[in-house]
Structure formats: C-alpha cells, structure tokens
Amino acid sequence: MPYTPLSDLEVIHRVLSGEKQLFELLMRRYNQRLYRTGLAALGGNVAGVEETMQNAWIKAYQHLSRFEGRASFPTWLTRIMLNECLMSLRGQHRLVELPQPEATTEASLREEHTPLHDVLNEELRQALETAIGTLPNTYRSVFMLREVEGMSVVETAQMLHLSETNVKVRLLRARERLRSQLQDFAPAHTFTYLGPRCDAMVHHVLARMGEVLQEAAPQLQ
C-alpha cells in the first residue's frame, strides 16, 4: 500500500494530542512559504526574515489550538508571519541569528528536482532574485505573494489589506519593471529555502519550543 503523508489537519491534531515532535513536519512543509512571505514584506534582509520566521513559528505553536480550519493552515500561518513582519519592522523582536550556508552548499538548496531545474541555471536564478529585490516594496510584496508563492488575487488582497484591483495593478507594474531586465524566468523555483537553511530553522525553533513549552501547555491541551 503506498505511503500517504499526514495532512496538515492530522499533524495538528496529533501535535495537540501530545506528539509535539510532529510540529517539525509543518515547519518543513512551510518554511519556504514563510521565507518568501518575509522577503515580500521585509525586502532582502535575509537575517531579519529568518528572525521573523522564528517568531512566527513559535507564535503558531503557542496558538495552534486556536486554528479552527475555516481557512487553510498555510493561509492562517501566512497571516501570522505577516503580522510578525509588521512587528519586526517596528523593532519589537530580536531572536537567534541563523548561520548562513557557505557558497559551496548552494547546490544542496535545490532538493526538489524537476525538468525545469535542468534549464534554470544558477546565474538566471540569481539575476531574477536580484531584479525582484530592486522592486519598490509596494510592487515586490504583491509579486512575491502572487507569482512566487502562488496565492490568488483574493488571498493576496486579504493578506496585504488591498483591493483586488490594486493587487492586479501592482502586479502588472511589477511585471513591466522586470520585463526589461528578464525575458524568461520561473518564479516558482526561486527564493528556495531548503537543505541546510531549512534544517537550521527547524533546529532553532524546536529548541525554542522547549523553552516555551510550559507557557504553551495550557493552550495546547
């Protein structure tokens, strides 16, 4: 019988039932989503994004019992991340700085191999990330959530507190700015957060979960 991965709801139920180590599954599924969301909100400040990711994961763990399933878990989690980004911009948080992987480990960050990876070379990937990083924040946030993370217009509008029309206009303008620099690109495979970087995030958050376990315990029961 083929192996069927646990759904998000199944993992959440088991974490709330005491199997707290399974929270790692959720982290590994959505680290890249939070990373991309953080880049959309905070720009190219990778260290700041990773600090905010730690905050978001701890907040999600502490309030996991409040997840009611009315929205999908990744949508609920992304809202937490965006709220933490706002607080990070206000200077309210500071956590452990994660070590950056050395250049020699860059190839290991592309764990999910598809035929597209055979043609999407490293220079093109870096050029795209650099080009997106130069976009004004109002355009970059919409572009990252819509084109890189794959959110719908409705979801993006809700996340950024914009009208759907504004989302469409800003996305169009972002594309126009990028078109002059890049002709062909594959946004779904850029801004990866895999391999050693994902491992480091999981390690630090799991360590902090132990520190907050007593505080979170009443909410997880």
Image: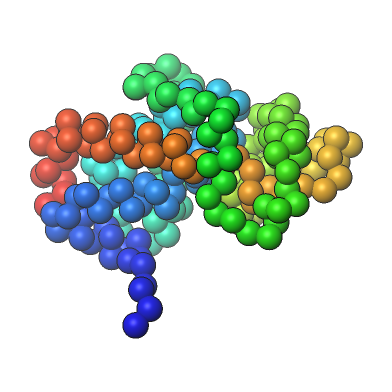
**In the displayed structure, does residue 103 sit left or right of residue 213?**
right
Please state which of residues 209 and 175 is positioned toward the viewer in this rendering. 209
**In the displayed structure, does residue 148 sit left or right of residue 211?**
right
Q: Can you name the residue that lies furthest to the front here? A: 104
**Residue located at (75% from left, 52% from top):** 119
Coloration mode: rainbow
Q: Position of residue 114 (x, y in %)?
A: 63, 59
Q: Position of residue 123 (x, y in %)?
A: 74, 36
**Residue located at (57% from left, 27% from top):** 103
Please identify the quarter of the rendering in which residue 211 is found. top left
**In the displayed structure, does residue 192 sit left or right of residue 133?**
left
**Residue located at (46% from left, 42% from top):** 195
The answer to whether residue 98 is seen in the rendering is: yes
Q: Position of residue 35 (x, y in %)?
A: 50, 38
User: Is residue 56 shown above or below 112?
Assistant: above
**Quarter holding the N terminus?**
bottom left
User: Is residue 192 shown above or below 54?
Assistant: below
User: Is residue 6 shown above or below 36?
Assistant: below
